[in-house]
Image (cartoon, helix red, strand yellow):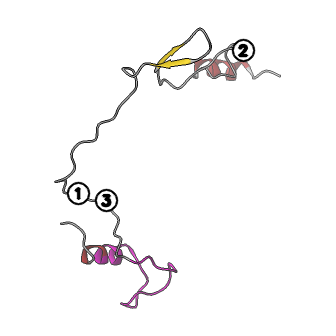
């Protein structure tokens, strides 16, 4: 079964997948080679090619993640808090600032 000629033209413009290519086609994911294969079937890693990520110094960083450890999570989304209203976004932000959020 083949697609109609109109559909075949649109399929030709799409990116080649492993199912459309030759039987030994491997698309890969653009990571690059981190070393080379040996003649005995092993793989030798070249550490000059290995990606390393350097984290900057965050000791005096002013922003904090949007997580507070002191705030208790409500057991039921529709349960009223101490103020008598269900928990909503404004209530959460207010309690988050009261419980030690950075300015």
What's the distance in space between the residues labelled 1 and 2, CA to CA? 51 Å
Q: Earlier in the sequence, mark 2 or mark 3?
A: 2
7 above or below 80? above
Residue that mark 2 sits on: 23
Residue that mark 1 sits on: 63
- The reply to whether residue 1 is in sight is yes
Task: Give residue 16's position: percent from left, percent from top.
Answer: 60, 20
Residue furthest out toward the top? 39
Q: Residue 65: which disc?
A: 3
Between 53 and 79, the one nearer to me in the picture: 53
Q: Quadrant of residue 28?
A: top right
What's the distance in space between the residues labelled 2 and 3, CA to CA? 48 Å
| Main secondary structure found in the magenta portion | loop
Task: Give residue 3's position: percent from left, percent from top.
Answer: 75, 23
Q: Residue at x 58, y 17 (%)?
A: 42
Residue furthest out toward the front? 40
What's the distance in space between the residues labelled 3 and 1, CA to CA? 7 Å
Task: Give residue 87's position: percent from left, percent from top.
Answer: 42, 80
17 above or below 102? above
Q: Earlier in the sequence, mark 1 or mark 2?
A: 2
Q: Residue at x 40, y 91 (%)?
A: 84
Instruction: Mark 2: give few (<14), some (14-19) or many (20+) Cα within 10 Å.
Output: few
Magenta stretch? 72-95
**Secondary structure under the numbered disc 2 in the rendered image:** loop
Q: Residue 38: which disc?
A: none
């Amino acid at each position: 079964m083949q697609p109609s000629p109109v559909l075949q033209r649109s399929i030709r413009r799409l990116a080649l997948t492993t199912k459309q290519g030759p039987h030994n086609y491997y698309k890969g994911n653009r990571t690059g080679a981190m070393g080379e294969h040996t003649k005995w079937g092993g793989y030798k890693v070249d550490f000059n090619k290995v990606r390393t990520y350097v984290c900057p110094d965050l000791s005096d960083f002013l922003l904090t993640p949007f997580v507070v450890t002191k705030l208790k999570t409500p057991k039921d989304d529709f349960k009223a808090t101490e103020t008598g209203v269900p928990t909503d976004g404004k209530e959460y932000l207010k309690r988050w600032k009261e419980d030690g959020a950075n300015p």
